[in-house]
C-alpha cells in the first residue's frame, strides 16, 4: 500500500494542524508561569466536552483499532463487550466514585491511597503504575501503531515507531494535559469520521455496491458464528470470552480498574471544573462507547469475507485500509495516527504526573519548586517514551492478538487494584495492612490460579481473585489495629451523590440501547 500525493497532503495537514492547535490551547497569560496544577491537571478547568472526548481519545488507540479489529476477525462481535460494558462502567464511576475523588481534591490515584491508608501503599502503587504504563500500555500502542504505519507507508517499523513517539512528545510536552485534552475533540471527530468511512467502504465492497446493510448481512451469512455476543463453551475462543461469565464476572473488575482507578483515564475527570461537569463528560464518553464497536470491530468482520486466510488477525485493519481510494485513505490514516498519538500523549502525561507528584515531590526535603516539577515531568515523559520504544519488540513482537495479550497480562494485577479502592471508598474499617495484603495477595493468587488451573478463562480468574482479595483485605484489617483517627483523611460523610436530570435521562438511554444490542446479538 502506498499513499498518493493527496493522501500525504491530508496527513501532513493533520500533523501540522494538531501541533499548532496544541501550542495555541497551551498558551498562558502574560507573566504566568506553568505550575504543576496547570501542567498535570489543566488548571482544573476542563469542560465536559473536552473530558468526554479526551477519555475516548486516550482509550481508543492502536490496541483497540488494530487489536480489536484483529479479535473481530478471529472471534467476532463478542469482543465488543469490552466497549459496550465500558459504557455502563463509566456511568457507575460518574455516579459513585467521582464525587468522592473531587470532594477530596484528589489529583492522582496513589495520592488517594495515601490519604486513605498511608504512605507505603502510595509509593508501592506509584512504582507499579509507572512500570505498567511504560512496559504494557506505551509499548503496545507504539508497537501496534508503528506496525500499521509501516504497512500503509512501507516505512521500516522502528522508524515509524520513532516518528510516532517524537510527534506525540512534540505536540504535548509544552502544554501537558491541557494540550492533550483540548485537542482531543478534534482527534475524536477525525477518528469517528475516518472510521465510519472505512466501515462504509469495506461493507459496500462486501456487497459489491449494494450498501452497508447488505454487506453486513453477507458477512453474517458467511460467518454466522462471528455474530454472537455470548460464546458457547465449544467455541475455540471461549477462554478469551467465556460466555455469560463476561456479563456476570471478571470483566467488570477489569473495567472498573481501567475506567475508575486508572490514572491516564480518570485524570481528565479529576481536572474538571466541578463534579457536574465531570459527570456530563463521562456520560458523553459512555454515549461514544456505544459507537466504538462499529469503528473498531466491523472492519475485522468485513475482512473475514474480503481477506480470508490472513497470516495474523492483527493484519485485518491495515488490510481493509488497502481497499480505500486516494483521498479517503488519507483521512482514515490521519484518523489512525490521531488515535495513536493522543493515547501516547495521554499515557506519557500520566506517567510524568505520577512520577513527579507521587515519587519525586515526596523525596524532596522542602516544598518542591513548581517550575522544576514541570521540568521533571517533561524529562520523565521523554525517558518513558524512549524506554517503551526499546522494549516494544521484545515484549510484543511474537503475539498475533496483542489486545488479548494485554487483557490477560493486566488481569494478574487488576483484582487487587479494584479490591483496595473498593475497600478504601466504601468501608471505613479497612486499614493499610489490609490494603497491602489485598494488593500483594491478589498477584500471588492470580499466579497460583494460572498455575493450578491453566485452562481457567482469565476473566473467571480475575473475578475469583477479586473476591478472594477483598476477603483477604477484610480479614487482615479486622485482625489488625483500626486506622488512627487522623489516618483516614478521605471524607465521604458529606458527599452528594445526586445527579442532574440530564445525566439520569442520558444514563437510562445508554442502558436501553445496550439491552437492545445484547438482545439482538445474543
Image (spheres, rainbow, N blue to C red):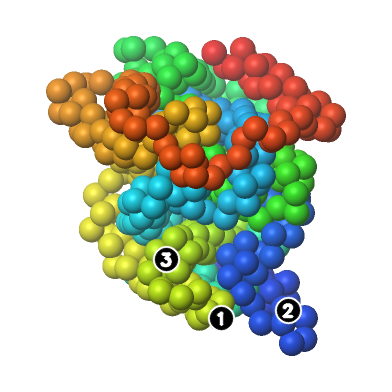
Q: Where 397 sits versus 495, above or below?
A: below
Q: Nearer the viewer, mark 3 or mark 1?
A: 3
The residue at the point 77 percent across, 81 percent down is 29
* Residue at image mark 2: 28
The residue at the point 69 percent across, 35 percent down is 494
Q: Nearer the viewer, mark 2 or mark 1?
A: 1
Give the residue at the far bottom of this rendering: 31
From the image, which quarter does the C terminus lie in?
Answer: top right
Q: Distance between the residues labelled 2 and 1?
A: 14 Å
Camera-side residue of 196 and 288 = 288
Query: Does any portion of residue 255 appear in the rendered image?
Result: no
Identify the mark nearer the N-term, 2 or 1.
Answer: 2
* Residue at image mark 3: 362
Marker count (numbered): 3
Estimate how packed mark 1 is, as few (under 14), some (14 to 19) or many (20 or more) residues with alpha carbons within 10 Å: some
Estimate how packed mark 2 is, as few (under 14), some (14 to 19) or many (20 or more) residues with alpha carbons within 10 Å: few
Q: How far apart are marks 3 and 2 (CA)?
A: 27 Å
Label 1: state its secondary structure. helix
How far across and down, in percent of the image, does residue 235 sit? Answer: 34, 17
Label 3: state its secondary structure. helix
Camera-side residue of 330 and 137 = 137
Q: Where 152 sits versus 457, above or below?
A: below
2 and 1 marks in contact (CB < 8 Å):
no
How far across and down, in percent of the image, does residue 282 sit? Answer: 68, 41
Q: How far apart are marks 3 and 1 (CA)?
A: 16 Å
Give the residue at the far right of this rendering: 501
* Residue at image mark 1: 371
Give the residue at the far left of this rendering: 452
Image quarter for residue 501? top right
Camera-side residue of 493 and 457 = 493
Relative to 356, is 310 on the left or the right?
A: left
Amino acid at each position: 500500500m502506498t499513499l498518493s500525493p493527496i493522501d500525504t497532503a491530508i496527513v501532513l495537514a493533520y500533523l501540522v494542524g494538531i501541533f499548532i492547535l496544541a501550542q495555541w490551547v497551551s498558551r498562558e497569560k502574560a507573566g504566568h508561569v506553568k505550575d504543576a496544577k496547570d501542567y498535570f491537571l489543566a488548571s482544573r478547568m476542563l469542560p465536559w466536552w473536552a473530558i468526554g472526548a479526551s477519555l475516548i481519545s486516550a482509550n481508543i488507540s492502536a490496541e483497540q483499532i488494530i487489536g480489536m479489529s484483529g479479535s473481530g476477525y478471529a472471534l467476532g462481535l463478542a469482543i465488543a463487550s469490552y466497549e459496550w460494558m465500558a459504557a455502563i462502567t463509566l456511568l457507575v464511576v460518574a455516579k459513585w466514585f467521582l464525587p468522592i475523588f473531587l470532594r477530596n481534591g484528589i489529583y492522582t490515584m496513589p495520592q488517594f491511597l495515601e490519604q486513605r491508608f498511608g504512605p507505603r501503599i502510595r509509593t508501592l502503587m506509584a512504582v507499579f503504575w509507572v512500570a505498567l504504563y511504560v512496559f504494557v500500555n506505551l509499548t503496545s500502542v507504539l508497537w501496534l501503531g508503528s506496525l500499521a504505519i509501516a504497512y500503509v507507508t512501507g516505512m521500516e517499523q522502528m522508524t515509524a515507531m520513532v516518528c510516532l513517539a517524537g510527534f506525540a512528545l512534540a505536540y504535548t510536552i509544552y502544554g501537558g494535559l491541557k494540550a492533550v485534552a483540548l485537542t482531543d475533540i478534534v482527534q475524536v471527530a477525525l477518528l469517528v469520521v475516518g472510521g465510519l468511512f472505512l466501515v462504509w467502504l469495506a461493507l459496500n465492497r462486501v456487497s459489491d455496491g449494494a450498501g452497508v446493510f447488505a454487506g453486513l448481512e453477507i458477512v453474517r451469512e458467511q460467518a454466522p458464528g462471528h455474530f454472537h455476543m455470548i460464546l458457547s463453551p465449544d467455541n475455540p475462543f471461549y477462554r478469551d470470552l467465556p460466555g455469560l461469565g463476561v456479563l456476570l464476572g471478571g470483566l467488570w473488575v477489569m473495567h472498573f480498574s481501567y475506567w475508575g482507578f486508572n490514572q491516564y483515564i480518570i485524570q481528565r475527570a479529576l481536572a474538571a471544573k466541578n463534579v457536574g461537569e465531570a459527570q456530563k463528560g463521562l456520560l458523553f464518553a459512555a454515549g461514544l462507547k456505544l459507537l466504538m464497536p462499529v469503528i473498531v470491530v466491523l472492519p475485522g468482520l468485513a475482512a473475514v469475507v474480503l481477506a480470508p486466510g490472513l497470516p495474523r488477525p492483527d493484519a485485518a485493519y491495515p488490510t481493509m485500509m488497502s481497499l480505500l481510494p486516494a483521498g479517503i485513505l488519507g483521512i482514515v490514516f490521519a484518523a489512525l495516527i490521531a488515535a495513536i498519538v493522543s493515547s501516547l500523549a495521554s499515557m506519557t502525561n500520566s506517567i510524568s504526573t505520577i512520577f513527579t507528584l507521587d515519587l519525586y515531590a515526596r523525596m524532596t526535603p522542602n516544598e518542591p519548586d513548581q517550575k522544576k516539577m514541570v521540568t521533571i515531568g517533561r524529562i520523565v515523559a521523554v525517558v518513558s517514551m524512549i524506554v517503551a520504544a526499546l522494549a516494544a519488540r521484545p515484549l510484543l513482537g511474537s503475539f498475533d492478538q496483542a489486545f488479548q495479550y494485554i487483557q490477560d497480562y493486566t488481569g494478574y494485577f487488576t483484582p487487587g487494584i479494584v479490591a483496595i479502592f473498593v475497600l478504601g471508598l466504601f468501608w471505613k474499617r479497612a486499614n493499610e495492612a489490609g490494603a497491602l495484603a489485598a494488593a500483594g495477595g491478589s498477584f500471588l493468587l492470580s499466579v497460583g490460579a494460572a498455575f493450578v488451573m491453566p485452562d481457567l478463562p482469565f476473566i473467571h480468574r480475575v473475578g475469583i481473585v477479586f473476591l478472594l482479595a477483598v476477603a483477604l483485605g477484610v480479614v487482615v484489617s479486622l485482625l489488625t489495629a483500626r486506622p488512627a483517627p487522623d489516618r483516614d483523611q478521605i471524607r465521604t460523610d458529606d458527599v452528594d451523590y445526586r445527579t442532574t436530570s440530564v445525566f439520569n435521562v442520558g444514563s437510562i438511554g445508554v442502558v436501553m440501547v445496550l439491552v437492545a444490542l445484547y438482545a439482538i446479538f445474543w
